[in-house]
Image: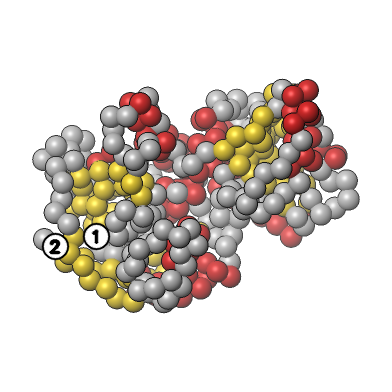
Amino acid sequence: METVKAYAAMEAGAALQAYEYELPELKSDEVEIKVETCGICHSDLSMLNNDWQMTQYPFVGGHEVTGTVASVGELVPNLKIGDRVGLGWLSRSCMHCDQCISGNQNLCLTAEGTITHQHGGFADRVKCHWGWASKLPDGLDPAMCGPLLCGGITVFHPMIQHQLSPTSRVGVVGIGGLGHMALMFLRAWGCEVTAFSRTRSKEQSARDLGAHEFVATDEEGALESVAGKFDLIINTTNVDIPWDTYISTLAPKGILHTVGAAPKIEATVFPMIMGQKSMSSSPLGSIATTRTMLDFCARHGIAPMTETFAMSDINDAFEKLRTSPAHRIVLLNP
């Protein structure tokens, strides 16, 4: 067994400290990844604080991993030592249920999370099922790739799920860690893109990222001015929004899709029926969709806005996340 050098919290909300553990023996269908970079996501913060009442301590977070394959199990078909790969929220799915066989591995009922079922990537080693270790295309900076494997795939997946046309009119609610990537994806996809934010403080940034139009929702009549316009709206926020008013901005057959974990949804059904409108949501994306996203980013030169810290400065990085959630933060191993 191999000793892993990691950073762990010993209790809810505690500072992370140096921690060592023995990596379990590699299964025949697993790969071991030498961690080069690991992003910090708001989900890591939620797990650190045990907000979801599922964290086990000592807790080693980190589910936006890039690195090189250090070891492969005997049944791994597509990876070899030295391959540069990325690992996101999921580290394993069963590969034999109806969801997995149909290509929806992210919906597998027995899927295992990188930081919920094992120790994660705030370490020098991490392991996963070979299917969830995605090869990184040439042309992508590995230091920028980690956030794509969680936040990126979260906002890219709805584009595939809804078979989005490049002529679609699409709105993005929230211009933070998720929303800024959605703007870049949608602009490169060819869509007419509108950014929604409470005030105009992020307008220039949103336009620089790809938004054609900007709506400041705190301004009187702002949402009413775009009634009936959008084929798809992607909500990236985790707060209550005026659901009925956003539904009124949808064109007939339009979809309001949320990837932000809002506490609840309250909407009036009749306007949805009359316009054949709908609401939907999604978690992450499948293995194939993740690979498609990475190829798309390489082709179009898309990279998230990131700030880097040394892995040893992980507590400073978490404090930055708490105060500046709009940026994605990446930890670098020496």
Q: Residue at x 78, y 23 (%)?
A: 274
Where, by quadrant of the figure, is residue 308 drawn? bottom left
- What amino acid does circle 2 point to? Glu
What's the mark number on residue 2?
A: 2
Please rate how many residues cluster around mark 1, counting C-alpha atoms within 10 Å: few if below 14, some from 14 to 19, many from 20. Answer: many
Q: Residue at x 53, y 56 (%)?
A: 305
Q: Is residue 2 left or right of residue 112?
A: left
Q: Is residue 65 left or right of residue 40?
A: left
Q: Taking the image as drawn, is residue 251 in sight?
A: no
In this view, the residue in front, 97 or 69, is: 97
**Position of the C terminus by quadrant:** bottom left
> How far across and down, in percent of the image, does residue 195 sit?
70, 45
Please rate how many residues cluster around mark 2, counting C-alpha atoms within 10 Å: few if below 14, some from 14 to 19, many from 20. Answer: few
Q: Residue at x 81, y 54 (%)?
A: 218
**Position of the N terminus by quadrant:** bottom left
Location of residue 2 with respect to 104 vertically, above or below = below
In this view, the residue in front, 273 or 91, is: 273
Q: Which residue is mark 1?
A: 125
- What amino acid does circle 1 point to? Arg
Q: Are marks 1 and 2 in contact (CB under 8 Å)?
A: yes
> How far across and down, in percent of the image, does residue 264 sit?
65, 48
In this view, the residue in front, 243 or 136, is: 243
> How far across and down, in percent of the image, does residue 235 sit?
64, 44
> How far across and down, in percent of the image, does residue 293 sit?
44, 38
What's the mark number on residue 273?
A: none
Q: Residue at x 20, y 45 (%)?
A: 30
Residue projecting furthest to the front: 53
Q: Earlier along the polypeptide chain: callout 1 or callout 2?
A: 2
Label 1 and label 2: CA atoms lie apart by: 9 Å
Q: Secondary structure at mark 1?
A: strand
Q: Secondary structure at mark 2?
A: strand
